[in-house]
Image: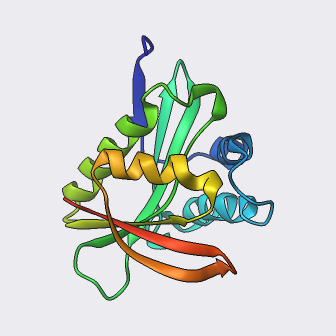
Amino acid sequence: MSHHISFRTDPTPKDIENVRGIVESTSFFQDHEIPIAVELVEERLAKGLGSGYHFIFAEIEWRTAAYACYGEIPCTKGSYDLYWIATHKDYQGKGIGKKLMKEIENQIKGIGGRVIYIETSSKVQYEPTRKFYENYGCELEAILKDFYDTGDDKCIYSLVL
């Protein structure tokens, strides 16, 4: 991609709609999941880092093209959950997700993280998501059968930093 990608970590009120637009554009998430993504931004805006939610926003030409949300797993030392990572459909397939993952890695390493855990669905529509994580170097650690629904397993990946 010829455009410069910049990253920022502090959400702004505009990110409430940025996140909603990104998540809706992907057509991957169910209607009940979209408000959850937005709520995490709102909670971070209200409570700051005390919310436990960290964000990274990838911007191209002043437009938020992708974002990620992660946080330390309570009662662990250096283990983090990647709660959300999504790229707006207009920017998918351009390497932004890989660059965002690298930025996530760098940010988590910088605050003493040692491993990132990532959860996704086993449904066929999430095959590109699972391939993305596998191609990035994440290891499939566990499959929880019928976790989300009958026939919809939870796939748990890890990325050791």
Q: Is residue 100 left or right of residue 78?
A: right
Most foreground residue, 14 or 128:
128
Residue 151 on image: x %, y %: 66, 75
Location of the N terminus (image quadrant): top left
* Residue at the spot 56% in from the left edge and 65% down from the top edge: 122
Q: Is residue 79 left or right of residue 83?
A: left
Extreme residue toward the right, this view: 31
Q: How is the image coloured?
A: rainbow
Q: Is residue 136 left or right of residue 118?
A: left
Q: Is residue 61 left or right of residue 52?
A: right
User: Where is 1 relative to 51, above or below?
Assistant: above
User: Where is 83 relative to 92, above or below?
Assistant: below
User: Where is 60 relative to 120, above or below?
Assistant: above
Number of disc labels? 0
Most foreground residue, 1 or 145:
145
Residue 74 on image: x %, y %: 37, 84
Extreme residue toward the top, this view: 2
* Residue at the spot 54% in from the left edge and 82% down from the top edge: 145
Residue 18 on image: x %, y %: 67, 41
**Residue 33 picture quarter:** bottom right
**Residue 113 picture quarter:** bottom left
* Residue at the spot 68% in from the left edge and 65% down from the top edge: 36
Most foreground residue, 149 or 84:
149
* Residue at the spot 65% in from the left edge and 77% down from the top edge: 148
Residue 19 on image: x %, y %: 65, 47
Location of the C terminus (image quadrant): bottom left
**Residue 111 picture quarter:** bottom left
Extreme residue toward the bottom, this view: 75
